[in-house]
């Protein structure tokens, strides 16, 4: 395939994202994945220094504070990444501001996974230490806030900001619980839209639009080659500082789903609803114009409705695909590089034999163009909260 590979050039401007790297602290501290203030500052609430040192020293906390585990969702295109950056709007920066307004003191937020600018989160997780001090009697430490109070209060201030980030869950955890190092598994989803028509304004910056048809069966075969324990050097962007390119990919799958903006016609409604009105995912024989196979039903009655002009003014729907990647940790840009490869297989630019060749090449220059950030979603971070 002749596609250029900007991964090396783009990623050389910044080092590896450690949150997608080794989940345990390395003996030698790595550089932060985002540009940061070179002058560390100790925060009044007992938080550690800024930068990578603060990640390792997060346990050096105020013993009077309560540590909370906080799950958040956000629209990645509204932020310059998750980690703090000077003069940039970031996820951590906005969260710290909201907590500050809530409790009246600065706090330090530590994320489980550091997402790049443009990458969304259905559930990123962070931890924060909060010392509840009486406003009537300064210096008097009060009983910690209940998690529900924290959630409602922080969301109140987030809503007053831009409303593009929300706390979805809060839980009290042990003083030594670390959102990054205690993570057992991370799951990412990537959305692709396939079809010649331009993307709807409602889908802007939410999925990667591919004008060609995608062969889902070929993409699934490519996924099976990448699943398992491999040297993923070919899917490791330049600048990554992970100690090893070896990773165990527990899942890599592709599924066709209903488009996000799916408003069924009367014919489709009759086919999708059961007698009690619940949705039925019908698995009828594929009838696709591409002839490449689909995971969703498409009936002749619906096609006839379209061909008779009954839907004048309605845009044609794209086919929507979701790639899911699940592992304990990932290399810098690994998911986006793998999706770029799957897309090339889906369009026929590469074969499954090429997938094996690229994996064995052990160099990112062998991989096709990396998928853009705005189609990627951090879906879930798994913990054992009972341990």
Image (tube, grey):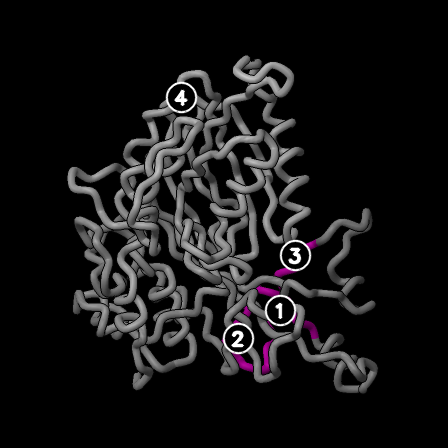
Query: Distance of mark 2 from mark 4, alpha carbons?
Result: 48 Å
Q: Who comes first in sequence, dot 2 or dot 4?
A: 4
Mark 1 and mark 2 residues within 8 Å of each other at the beta carbon? yes
Query: Distance of mark 3 from mark 1, alpha carbons?
Result: 23 Å
Q: Who comes first in sequence, dot 3 or dot 1?
A: 1
Q: Which mark is residue 53?
A: none
| Residue in the picture at 22% in, 47% down | 30
Q: Which residue is mark 2?
A: 209
Label 4 secondary element: loop
Relative image position of residue 374 (x, y in whole percent): 49, 65
43 in relation to 207, above or below: above
| Residue in the picture at 43% in, 36% down | 108
Q: Which residue is mark 4?
A: 62
Query: Distance of mark 4 from mark 3, alpha carbons?
Result: 52 Å
Q: Who comes first in sequence, dot 1 or dot 4?
A: 4
Mark 3 and mark 1 residues within 8 Å of each other at the beta carbon? no
Magenta stretch?
280-299
Label 3 secondary element: loop
């Amino acid at each position: 395939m002749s596609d250029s590979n900007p991964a090396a050039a783009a990623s050389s401007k910044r080092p590896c994202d450690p949150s997608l790297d080794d989940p345990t602290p390395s003996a030698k501290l790595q550089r932060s994945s985002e540009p940061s203030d070179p002058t560390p500052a100790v925060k009044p609430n007992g938080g550690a220094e800024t930068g990578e040192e603060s990640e390792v020293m997060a346990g050096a906390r105020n013993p009077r504070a309560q540590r909370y585990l906080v799950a958040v969702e956000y629209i990645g295109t509204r932020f310059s990444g998750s980690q703090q950056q000077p003069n940039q709007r970031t996820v951590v920066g906005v969260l710290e501001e909201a907590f500050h307004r809530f409790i009246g003191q600065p706090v330090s937020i530590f994320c489980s996974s550091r997402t790049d600018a443009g990458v969304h989160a259905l559930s990123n997780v962070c931890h924060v230490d909060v010392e509840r001090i009486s406003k009537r009697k300064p210096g008097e430490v009060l009983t910690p806030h209940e998690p529900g109070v924290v959630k409602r209060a922080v969301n109140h201030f987030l809503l007053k900001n831009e409303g593009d980030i929300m706390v979805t869950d809060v839980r009290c955890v042990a003083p030594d619980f670390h959102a990054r190092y205690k993570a057992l598994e991370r799951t990412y989803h990537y959305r692709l839209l396939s079809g010649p028509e331009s993307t709807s304004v409602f889908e802007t910056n939410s999925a990667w639009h591919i004008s060609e048809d995608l062969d889902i069966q070929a993409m699934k075969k490519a996924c099976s080659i990448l699943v398992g324990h491999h040297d993923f050097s070919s899917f490791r962007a330049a600048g990554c500082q992970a100690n090893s390119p070896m990773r165990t990919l527990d899942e890599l799958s592709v599924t066709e789903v209903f488009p996000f903006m799916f408003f069924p016609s009367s014919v489709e409604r009759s086919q999708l609803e059961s007698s009690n009105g619940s949705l039925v995912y019908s698995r009828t024989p594929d009838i696709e114009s591409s002839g490449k196979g689909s995971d969703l039903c498409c009936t002749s009655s619906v096609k006839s409705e379209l061909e008779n002009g009954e839907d004048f003014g309605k845009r044609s729907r794209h086919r929507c695909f979701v790639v899911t990647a699940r592992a304990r940790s990932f290399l810098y840009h690994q998911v986006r590089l793998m999706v770029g490869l799957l897309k090339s297989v889906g369009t026929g630019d590469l074969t499954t034999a090429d997938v094996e060749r690229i994996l064995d090449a052990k160099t990112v220059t062998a991989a096709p163009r990396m998928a853009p950030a705005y189609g990627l979603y951090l879906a879930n971070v798994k913990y054992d909260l009972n341990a």
